[in-house]
Image (cartoon, grey):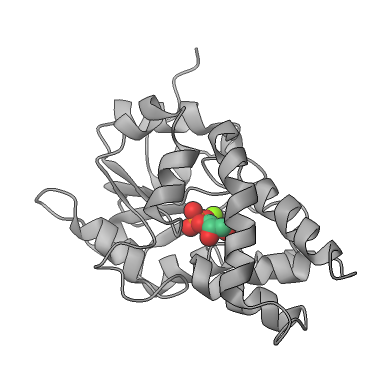
Amino acid sequence: MRTITHVLFDMDGLLLDTEKFYSVVQEKILSGYGKSFTWSLKAKMMGKRAAEAAEIFVHDSGLEGILSPRDFLTQREAMLEVMFPESQLLPGVERLVGYFQSQGIPMAIATSSHKRNFDLKTINHKELISRMHHVVVGDDPDVKLGKPAPDIFLVAASRFPDPKPRPENVLVFEDAPTGVEAAQNAGMSVVMVPDPNLDKSLCDRADIVLETLEDFDPSTFGMPPFIKN
Ligand SMILES: O=P(O)(O)OC[C@@H](O)CO
Ligand SMILES: [Mg+2]
């Protein structure tokens, strides 16, 4: 069994309940063209950086030549920026972050979200962010390729203080197939907490798949149990 010495958290859909904002807004934009937003399209977009997600949205919705990826993002951001400050923590986040902190396991966030949106989403979650050693955002200059490339997780692992973790000693928590793939490409272990609407065939690569972070059992990775409070 691999010894876990460091933890990396994805953010949207894993720490914060923000994927629903993306869905509502993308549904609204598509309805303007008489089209509907599907979970199969959502599954391809989630976890990706904005520019890549926009290309997929326009292409798969058959809107090429009608709606440019840039105009899509302009419309999407305008609607999302008022929603993001309302972001709520997902169930189990506080307990899990508190547990890793009590175990002296350093944590960081690795999110495809750009810095501007990260700041909007976390404006009311300063305490959570303060428990992270660092945050790597999607527009970080050192992140050359977005998820499913391993870049963002490798960059996040490299920013911990010495002794830096080897990938096999890092545990990643993710909600998206793209993110799970990125973690595995980085050589890291990964726990997936998928949205229940996600096609189950897209949730079979992770080391562990949970319905909620509340179901995480530290002993799965050789760590002490949660203290019963
Ligand atoms: O899940 P993260 O990497 O935080 O980014 C999500 C964002 O790309 C929207 O799906
Ligand atoms: Mg996510």
8 relative to 138, above or below: above
Q: Nearer the viewer, residue 69 or 228?
A: 69
In the rendered image, which quarter is residue 184 located in?
A: bottom left
Residue in the image at 59% along x and 32% along y: 86
Q: Is residue 164 left or right of residue 204?
A: left
| The N terminus: image quadrant | bottom left
State the image coordinates of residue 79 (x, y, percent, origin top left): 65, 49
174 relative to 67, above or below: above
State the image coordinates of residue 24 (x, y, percent, origin top left): 75, 51
29 relative to 40, above or below: above
Q: Nearer the viewer, residue 67 or 99?
A: 67
In the rendered image, which quarter is residue 150 located in?
A: bottom left
Q: Nearer the viewer, residue 154 or 48?
A: 48
The reply to whether residue 194 is visible in this rendering is yes
Q: Is residue 49 left or right of residue 62?
A: left
User: Extreme right residue here?
Assistant: 34
81 relative to 63, above or below: above
Q: Is residue 208 left or right of residue 9?
A: right
Residue in the image at 58% along x and 62% along y: 74
Q: Is residue 171 left or right of residue 192?
A: left
Residue in the image at 70% along x and 86% along y: 64
Q: Nearer the viewer, residue 153 or 229?
A: 153
Residue in the image at 56% along x and 72% along y: 70
The reply to whether residue 88 is visible in this rendering is no
User: Extreme top residue here?
Assistant: 229
